[in-house]
Image: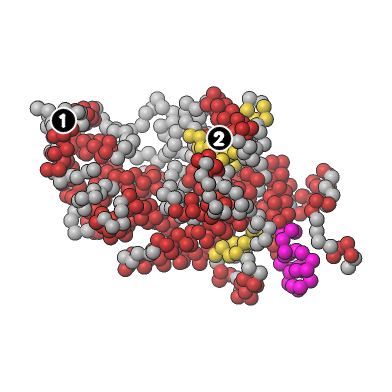
């Protein structure tokens, strides 16, 4: 070999290919990319550059390493082929892989069962995928099932200190933990689960190339001084902060964050499409903290227009010039609820505002719900004059250009959802001191609370016409209804009230019978009897006007309204005329008035309702 070929590679000295040669190069080696749009072609090569640059600068392709390790050249080719394969998967039009068949003729955008495409390819592949970590020192390996990898290769991975993502192995371990919890009702130490989350978070920081030096944006804004490294600050925030301590960092979530981050780095539009409550917003916000970037979340709605977004863009430009920000992310949530979808197309896809190019330091991410018909039951009330009433979500169709950049986000698996429910349930006891009776009581009930909520989700998905009508937002709402007073320990009653408000009272008579049977199997008494007792006792606390019959509908309305007010939970009371909607609100307002509130509090105590 010549002296020149033995030297380490310097990508900055490599000459660019001419346009014609580039076209022939793509057609010969990357036919799928050659047939895609120019935007996806640019994204493909930018992704390769981001992967190959740290690879050639890593120790694995240095001259000394190549000479010392005889297998290093083989690894070089394997990693190169794998990086190209992942780039091809990530940089194609994801929307084309949604299996809609005849539904595409109605412009339906999804079935609700799509997986995140990169995760789907990983799960179903017998091969392993390589990721070149942006720290320029390490490499990660995505393995679907470790059984498909021979022991010699695994030993080689460990020898080279590659980080392994073993999906099936992780799945089996998590399922085993849930089975052990279910059979023996054991409690996994919170420190153990947090340690695993911290390990994965520190790995994610390396993969994304987050520098170890610096200060979190949150600390800078609050002018908080800290001696911790940036990595430690981020880990402390996302593992111990109340808002993020229950976020489950699965391998799928990590892969989604990596894919979104790499797209942002290639300046390619990102539009995440998924069902309500599937985790799109929380994932982007979590990722914003991980990469320590200023994130501005914008809740788009039907009345959201040009004036509002212009204000947001002006605010971003002001921050960039004033605070010396290197980058700002704008997250447009539920972007297709606005009827002016063409204007959002210009902003997201063309990166222009009224024809003027936006600042390169402003990165735009969008999320949307799919435009899909809802499964209407014969008993459903529909508005013939409302064209959007037949759709699952009140959204408008995406234009064809936006579909080029759509990524189906995928649904939470049943296992992931159970993990989230357990993590969220653990957090409710944190409102109380560890030495109090209430804290210890909730700790004893953690398993039952999580299991009953998971069982409720399962039943509602089977009974309701639209299976996506329940999500983690219902879990949060249910736990918000779960009230425990520091002086009176009533965890069992609180759980029945919370389940009743969040799940049971949403069902028709047939559904309530099914729910009652399910919960009766899980406890000694019929659920409907326990809830009726709570509703009846609370109703006695209200001052009912003369000549007003305290019938079932009125009692249920008062019960729902009171707990929604007590917990500051938004609600919409819907029913036919004559079902006591207005009357129940008038009774509640009169009871909570200044002249009656003292008497009402005493009646609550008399009926065994104790609140702070």
State which quadrant residue 381 falls in. top left
The x and y percentages for residue 132 are 66, 58
Q: Residue at x 43, y 64 (%)?
A: 192
Q: Quadrant of the N terminus?
A: bottom right
Q: Residue at x 57, y 30 (%)?
A: 315
Q: In this picture, is 420 found above or below 506?
A: below
**Left or right: 191, with 285 as reference point:** left
Q: In this picture, is 264 found above or below 308?
A: below
Where does label 1 land, which residue? 596
Magenta residues (range): 55-77
Q: Residue at x 33, y 56 (%)?
A: 450
Q: Which mark is residue 128?
A: none
Number of numbered discs on residues:
2
Q: Main secondary structure of the magenta part?
A: helix
**Left or right: 9, with 207 as reference point:** right
Q: In this picture, is 572 found above or below 123?
A: above
Where does label 2 land, which residue? 398
Q: Residue furthest bottom?
A: 152
Q: Nearer the viewer, residue 213 or 376?
A: 213
């Amino acid at each position: 070999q010549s002296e020149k070929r033995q030297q380490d590679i310097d990508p900055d000295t490599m000459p660019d290919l001419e346009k014609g040669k580039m076209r022939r190069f793509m057609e010969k080696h990357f036919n799928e990319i050659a047939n895609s749009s120019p935007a996806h072609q640019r994204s493909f090569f930018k992704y390769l550059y981001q992967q190959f640059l740290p690879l050639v600068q890593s120790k694995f392709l240095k001259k000394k390493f190549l000479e010392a390790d005889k297998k290093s050249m083989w690894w070089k080719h394997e990693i190169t082929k794998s990086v190209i394969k992942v780039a091809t998967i990530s940089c194609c039009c994801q929307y084309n892989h949604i299996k809609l068949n005849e539904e595409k003729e109605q412009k339906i955008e999804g079935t609700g069962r799509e997986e995140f495409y990169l995760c789907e390819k990983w799960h179903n592949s017998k091969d392993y995928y390589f990721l070149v970590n942006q720290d320029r020192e390490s490499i990660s390996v995505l393995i679907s099932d470790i059984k498909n990898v021979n022991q010699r290769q695994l030993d080689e991975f460990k020898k080279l200190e590659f980080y392994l993502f073993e999906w099936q192995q992780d799945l089996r371990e998590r399922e085993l933990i849930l089975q052990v919890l279910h059979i023996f009702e054991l409690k996994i130490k919170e420190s153990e689960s947090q340690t695993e989350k911290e390990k994965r978070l520190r790995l994610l920081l390396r993969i994304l190339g987050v520098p170890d030096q610096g200060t979190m944006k949150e600390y800078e804004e609050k002018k908080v001084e800290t001696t911790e490294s940036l990595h430690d600050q981020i880990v402390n925030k996302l593992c111990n902060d109340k808002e993020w301590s229950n976020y489950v960092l699965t391998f799928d979530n990590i892969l989604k964050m990596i894919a979104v981050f790499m797209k942002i780095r290639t300046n390619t539009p990102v539009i995440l499409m998924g069902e309500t409550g599937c985790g799109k917003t929380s994932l982007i916000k979590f990722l914003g903290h991980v990469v320590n970037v200023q994130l501005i979340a914008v809740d788009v709605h039907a009345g959201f227009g040009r004036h509002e977004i212009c204000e947001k863009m002006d605010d971003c430009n002001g921050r960039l010039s004033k605070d010396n920000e290197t980058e700002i992310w704008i997250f447009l949530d539920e972007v297709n609820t606005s009827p002016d979808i063409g204007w959002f197309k210009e902003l997201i896809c063309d990166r222009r505002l009224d024809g003027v190019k936006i600042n390169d330091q402003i990165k735009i991410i969008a999320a949307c719900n799919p435009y899909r018909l809802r499964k209407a039951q014969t008993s459903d009330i529909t508005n013939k004059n409302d064209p959007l009433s037949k759709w699952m979500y009140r959204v408008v169709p995406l234009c064809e250009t936006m579909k080029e950049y759509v990524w189906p986000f995928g649904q939470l698996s049943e296992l992931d959802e159970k993990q989230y429910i357990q993590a969220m349930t653990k957090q409710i006891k944190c409102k109380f001191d560890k030495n109090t009776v209430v804290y210890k009581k909730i700790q004893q009930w953690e398993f039952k609370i999580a299991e009953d909520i998971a069982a409720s989700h399962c039943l509602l998905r089977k009974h309701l016409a639209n299976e996506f009508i329940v999500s983690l937002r219902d879990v949060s709402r249910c736990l918000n209804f779960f009230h425990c007073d520091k002086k009176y320990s009533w965890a069992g009653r609180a759980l029945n009230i919370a389940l009743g408000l969040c799940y049971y009272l949403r069902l028709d008579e047939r559904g309530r019978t099914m729910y009652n049977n399910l919960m009766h199997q899980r406890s000694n008494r019929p659920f409907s009897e326990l809830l009726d007792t709570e509703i009846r006792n609370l109703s006695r606390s209200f001052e009912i006007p003369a000549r007003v019959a305290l019938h079932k509908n009125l009692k249920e309305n008062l019960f729902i309204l009171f707990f929604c007010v007590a917990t500051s939970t938004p609600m919409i009371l819907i029913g036919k005329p004559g079902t006591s909607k207005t009357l129940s609100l008038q009774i509640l307002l009169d009871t909570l008035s200044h002249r009656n509130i003292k008497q009402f509090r005493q009646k609550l105590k008399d009926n065994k309702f104790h609140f702070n």
